[in-house]
Image (cartoon, rainbow, N blue to C red):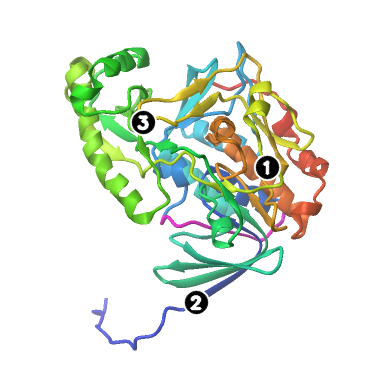
Amino acid sequence: MLEPRRIEIAATPPRSRVIAADLCVVGAGAAGVTAAVEAARQGLRVCLIDGLPQIGGQSVNGLIGTLCGFYSTGDAPYQLTYGFASDVLADLRQAGAISHRPGRRSYVALYDEAELAAIYARHLVRAGVEVVLGAVLTEVTREGDRIGALLAQTRYGPVSVTATTYVDASGDAVVAALAGLPLQQPDVPVYGTTMFSVAGVRTPVPLRAAIIARLEQVAEAYGLTRKDGFVFAFPARDLCLVNLTHYDTPLDAVAMTARALDAHHTIARVMDFLRGEFPDAFGAARVQSVGQPGVRQTRGIVAQRCLTTAEVRAGIRPDDAVGRCAWPIEFHGSAEGVHWEEFPDGHLTWIPLSAMIARDVRNLVAAGRCIDAEPFALGAVRVIGPCMAMGAAAAAAARLANGDLHAVTPGNVQAIVADNLQRTDPAIV
């Protein structure tokens, strides 16, 4: 082999990359990846962009570890979301990377986040989605009542995307915010969590009730504020995931960086608590990995209408329902704990298309936690199962819209996502 030579090159501005698509999806978490894959399968040219350098959003990089909201409640839970969501479940099963545990009168699936990332990537490539990672939005242009183009910056230079329709699956309504559209948010802080994994745990892991009971007694002694949460072990893996932290999640770069840095100090205090109070299980445990700061609610779009808490509590099915879930109201509005509202067996929350479509522009639809919903209502539909249902509905609406989501007939969207409204396959556990 010839020895390579060092050469000098002229300083040139980074090359601008221009992308044209039928649909541009912003945010590569569960909702965004679902929207991109489903839309590409339906024949659309799709571009998916995300500010992180790897795929998966919080479902991968946040070490969430649990697939919530995929099944109904009751003695015989059934699956609620299908299509790409079913493919993900099947691929995880085939890889031996999923297990189920009872929870909330239903099932919660535990998954391997590295395998989930690989599944996302594999299906995006197969579907022909053009993916741009590490692309931070800097500008969104408007042409009257439509989004015109998105401008993003990467380490390799600027990227501009022009599409007929846009999906805001950013979690924080970034597209709507940069477009200067009205936004909505809770009037109180909603707390996030930094998830982390622990290795070297001796089984059995203490029950959640035992951990909470001890936290309530000694949290202050360890410098901890939150007094509830979860520690759960993965079957056949020397690994536990810990969900015992709370912090506010301001939409400010410096403040959120401070939260991320402080998380390591808080995690050390959590480990002191676990080792000190449960030495048989955690005496030799060590932190293996720490997820990105987890965010639950910040701001959302202003849509054609708002999903209300009263609708969620009553299980009302709107005429334009495009997804369903059976998760409780889970609202993290206190540093000390979580507000839970459980529902009777068989209760469903229905997601209306009109809570996803932006009110003031005609070619923007939200999917995931930045839809228009009252804070408690969003607390019931922001978990991964219904987020994937929203992604599927956004893809169907984009296929039918031809750039005008306000003209889409909900019944036509419902026909495409019919499985997510009526199919009841028993949960495979």
Residue 335, which numbered label? 3
Q: Tell me what residue is drawn at x 69 percent, y 58 percent.
A: 361
How packed mark 3 is, by other alpha carbons closer than 10 Å (few <14, some 14-19, many 20 or more), is some
Residue type highlighted by circle 3: Ala
- Secondary structure mostly seen in magenta is loop
Magenta residue span = 43-53
Q: Tell me what residue is drawn at x 50 percent, y 24 percent.
A: 108
Question: On the image, numbered disc 2 is attached to which residue?
Answer: 16
In space, the residues marked 2 and 3 are separated at their CA atoms by: 44 Å
* Residue 396 shows in the view: yes
User: Which image quadrant for residue 181?
Assistant: bottom right
Q: Given this view, does label 2 or label 3 mark the residue nearer the observer?
A: 3
Residue type highlighted by circle 1: Ala
Above/below status of 5 relative to 93: below
Q: Is residue 120 magenta?
A: no
SS for callout 2: loop
How packed mark 2 is, by other alpha carbons closer than 10 Å (few <14, some 14-19, many 20 or more), is some
How packed mark 1 is, by other alpha carbons closer than 10 Å (few <14, some 14-19, many 20 or more), is many
Residue type highlighted by circle 2: Ser
Above/below status of 154 relative to 176: below
Left or right, 91 with reference to 358: left
Question: On the image, numbered disc 1 is attached to which residue?
Answer: 355
Q: Position of residue 204 (x, y in %)?
A: 29, 14
